[in-house]
Amino acid sequence: MSRVFHVRAGTSVSRARREGPPPRLPAPDAPPGCGVPPADRDPATGGIVAGYLAPHPPHLIYADNPPQNEPRSRGGWEVLRWGYEELRRRLTGPNRPDVLVVHAPHWITMVGHHVNCVPNPRGVSVEPIFPNLFRYHYDFRTDVELAESILTEADGLGLVTSAMREPDVRVDYATIGALHLVNPAWDLPVVSISANNNPYFYSDAALDEMEVLGEATRRAIEKTGRRAVLLASNSLSHLHWDVEPELPEDMAREHPYDQHQYEWDMRLLAAIREGPTSRLREVIPEHIAQTSSETKAGSLTWLLSAMGWPDVGGEVLAFGTVIGTGNALVEWTDRRG
């Protein structure tokens, strides 16, 4: 059914209006690296440095008490937050990338794959179910050149695409959540990609379109010479509680939704750890069917495709539940060479 949507939306006039003006380069006083690689960067050295399954539960940011988030907490979910500390440590020094590229399930677009091309998104992101936990003031830079390149490559591979250029766009909490947890300093430029959820309304839909988007992302990263880290902003099992405890961070109330969900999360993580990632082409859809996994949005498939389905296993940095949902931080680096 996903092939139904491989058409160009609108007329030539409306497409031209959506495409908008040429991309704007960062202002001269923009933070270093925001939108352009270092002057001496050889495009041949660009590529994907690492990929992370980086879930976005708003509870983790709430528990961290960053200044950008209005609500205050008493902590909680420490194992997952310690996992993010380790992830951040791994992105320092020579492993520091030029850009973070994130695919998130809550920027839902019904027609095509959208890429944020707004140079400096600013505003307040509110989690609609947990506004008492997540009201986050964001201000970050977009790598517009890379964003444009991803659109060009995806369009060339037959995907329906659109550039988001509305300066007052409100960025979704899944995008903000993953980016904050990976880089709370917000000193790296960003590219954010929407989740085209049309294919996932049909039980027989495959994730092959996300593989195409992954290939387009890889080509764009290499052609622009960026050293990029990819973030798949997905939880695993996604059944959750519908009643919040009086103290949201009460860890006595935190455990897997049920044993079935937990066991299937462990099956998926065992396959991830063992490798090769090509096995996951079959395991991910089965896990989705058994657990209502958030990976149905395709972020994890996009990431692994962009990395060329590495032959190595992934390293699980942390696993924990948030309101009963399964959440794993996983790192993939291509060590084949």
Image (cartoon, rainbow, N blue to C red):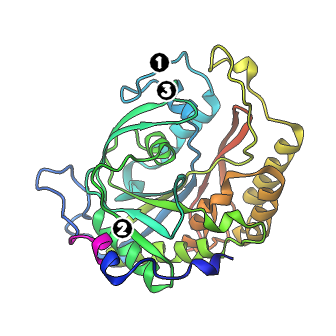
Q: Regarding mark 1 in the picture, which secondary structure is present there?
A: loop
Q: Quadrant of residue 76?
A: top right
Answer with mark 3 or mark 2, whichever residue precedes in sequence: 3
> Which of the marked residues, 1 or 3, is nearer the chain's N terminus?
3
| Residue 286 lies in the magenta stretch | no
Q: Position of residue 6 (x, y in %)?
A: 55, 81
The residue located at (44%, 46%) in the rendering is: 179
Q: Residue beneath label 3, please? A: 64
Write down the residue under mark 1.
72
Please say if 84 is above or below 218: above
Residue 262 placement, left or right of 162:
right
Q: Is residue 226 visible?
A: no
Residue appearing at x 52%, y 18% in the figure = 73
Disc 2: CA contacts within 10 A as few (<14), some (14-19) or many (>=20):
some
Sequence-wise, the earlier of marks 2 and 1 is 1
Amino acid identity at mark 2: Ala
Residue depicted at 48% across the width and 30% down the height: 134
Against 299, is 106 above or below?
above
Residue 1 visible somewhere in the drawing: yes
Q: Amino acid at mark 1?
A: Arg
Percent coordinates x, y for residue 162 in the rendering: 40, 70
Q: Nearer the viewer, mark 2 or mark 1?
A: 2
> Mark 2 = which residue?
163
Asked if the residue at tag 2 contacts the one at tag 3, i.e. Cβ–Cβ closer than 8 Å, the answer is no
98 relative position to 324: left or right? left
- CA separation, marks 2 and 1? 35 Å
| Secondary structure beneath label 3 | helix
Select label 3 or label 2 by which is in front.
2
Q: Which residues are magenta?
A: 16-22
